[in-house]
Amino acid sequence: MLKQHLLWFKNKGILLCLILFTSCSGNNPETEENESNSIVSEIVPQEQSGQSADTDLLENSEDNFTYETVFIEDQGWGYEIYNNDKLYINQPHIPAIQGVKGFSSSEKAAITAEFAIYKIQNGILPPTLSKQELDSLNVLD
């Protein structure tokens, strides 16, 4: 009888861990794409002690976001976002889609970079883009 109770608790514990893991993973229907395809493929940490880049972003009224489109041979177009001339986001491929494929044009990469900057400036951090948003921006081929 004791073994049956222990087995029951063990099974319930595993189930509870799975429920907690899936609820804490941060996935929701809008961002269920592969996390490796997140728009923030690389965030360069800021050189201020004791504060995260997200906190600095919201508190610094001197933020000046700009972007450049970049072409990568055999891949396509991507973009880099700068904050006060410091690299903030390097996005060499289309976010939120499977694989490593660049945008088909510099213009489509620029539209996406501008939308990412809009999200940053409105406190949406990280500025993750969904496939639906990219489709509504008409940047997917």
Image: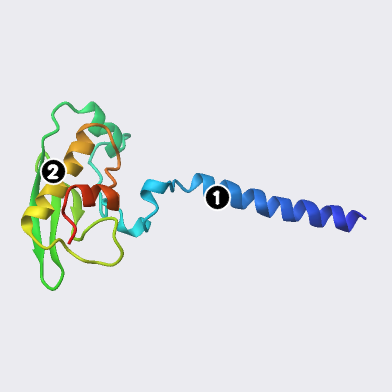
Residue at disc 2, secondary structure: helix
Residue 46: % across, % down: 23, 41
The answer to whether residue 80 of the structure is visible from this angle is yes
Q: Quadrant of the C terminus?
A: bottom left
Its colouring scheme is: rainbow
Q: Nearer the viewer, residue 33 or 40?
A: 33
Q: Amino acid at mark 2?
A: Glu
Residue 96: % across, % down: 29, 56
Residue 138: % across, % down: 16, 52
- Above/below status of 56 relative to 93: above
Q: Quadrant of residue 108?
A: bottom left
Question: Which residue is at 28% across, 36% downward?
Answer: 124
- Above/below status of 90 relative to 65: below
Q: Amino acid at mark 1?
A: Phe
The answer to whether residue 81 of the structure is visible from this angle is no
Residue 28: % across, % down: 43, 46
Q: Nearer the viewer, residue 125 or 138?
A: 138
- Above/below status of 33 relative to 117: below
Q: In the rendered structure, find residue 21 and report the number of the disc placed on it.
A: 1
Residue at disc 1, secondary structure: helix
The residue pinned by badge 2 equals 114
- In space, the residues marked 2 and 1 are separated at their CA atoms by 34 Å
Question: Which residue is at 10% across, 50% downward?
Answer: 110
Count neighbours of disc 1 (C-alpha within 10 A) and say few if under 14, some if 14 to 19, many if 20 or more. few
Determine contact: label 2, label 1, CB under 8 Å.
no
Q: Earlier in the sequence, mark 2 or mark 1?
A: 1
